[in-house]
Amino acid sequence: MNYPAEIITGCVHIHTTDSDGTQSIEEIAEIANQLGLDFIIVSDHMTLKSLKEGKEGYYGNTLVLIGYEIHDPDNRNHYLVYGLDEILPSNLRAPDYVKMAADKDALGIIAHPDEIRGHLPEYPRYPWTEWNIEGFNGIEIWNHMSRWMEGLKKYNKLKMFLSPRSFLTSPSDRILRIWDEFNQDRKVAGIGSIDVHAFPYKFGPFRLTIFPYKVQFQAIRTHLVLDKPLSRNLEVAKQQVITAIKECRVFISNYRWGDASEFKAFAESESSRVEIGGYANWTEGMDLSVSVPKAGEIAVIRNNKLYERCKGKIERIPLRIPGLYRVEVKLKNKGWIFSNHFNLR
Ligand SMILES: [Zn+2]
Ligand SMILES: [Zn+2]
């Protein structure tokens, strides 16, 4: 069998009317299905109501998974948990809920860790402050909502509301550095998330919806590299998604610049092939193969530093030394595709 067997494309971190979103799971699932998404992960604040009502499953061809978003008593340290049947107690601090979720084998992702905005007092920030933790599986390295909020100033409000995707340039250097550092020691997945609520907003005489679901689903996407096609059986499919994320078989993209689902990257030696997220011993003569759906600026990052840069569509880059590698693809200097790591020791 050829590995990868299948690359699936989805959107992560979705709010519904179960908390502060504006459409129901059924309506959101329908939009995702129409747009051809293979999966979405719903993360409402402090509730698993729809999970308990049996709403997890396939809607057309879209697998809808239901987790939730937990935060601490100060409304900081937001954390996406997937794979639990019950929500954890609401008075916990971050180190406790991260550990408890891990002990129950759930999937845990640090949400919008780099919220550093401070321009508009009406939108408070929700940063991640507890880095002395163990047991989380991933970090939102690119959160649409918080990156957009950071760029929001009084003078550009209307433009940003009308064209929310065009302001997404790249994940922040700060969070990429933190993510790269964690991966020196263990696997931590880099997730792209949309954090969609589709808020209604009154702007003078206009009524706008900030980030309608349909627009958001065509922005930051998370792609998973599976070793078998995604099962139609809910229980099997759930485990496939959880495992792929825990194993960092992940790349993320901004669909605004093009459909990235055909992106491929792997490291190869004469005798072996290492997929995204893989660990292997580095050997002399190793290459990194990168294939992009359309020509872009390809950068190979090694240990958080630029290792090599080239322009093209299909490239083979020699990996002359061991290291922690990953790939970034930009189009006209805007971030398009970000792979997870190849750990070649
Ligand atoms: Zn949040
Ligand atoms: Zn959220």
Image: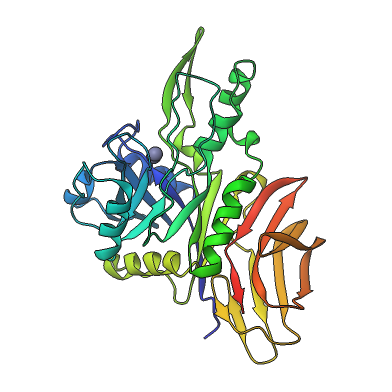
Vertical side of 101 occupied by 163: above or below: above
Residue ID at (64%, 34%): 167
Front one among 263 and 58: 263
Image spot of residue 242 (x, y percent) = 37, 65
Front one among 271 and 227: 271
Image spot of residue 271 (x, y percent) = 65, 92
- Location of residue 105 by image quarter: bottom left
Image spot of residue 301 (x, y percent) = 70, 62
Residue ID at (64%, 15%): 155
Left or right side of 8 for 85: left
Left or right side of 261 for 290: right
Residue 59 shows in this picture: no
Residue 242 shows in this picture: yes
Vertical side of 237 occupied by 10: above or below: above
- Location of residue 107 by image quarter: bottom left
Left or right side of 258 for 108: left
- Location of residue 309 by image quarter: bottom right
Q: Quadrant of ligand 2?
A: top left
Image spot of residue 121 (x, y percent) = 47, 19
Residue ID at (45%, 31%): 125
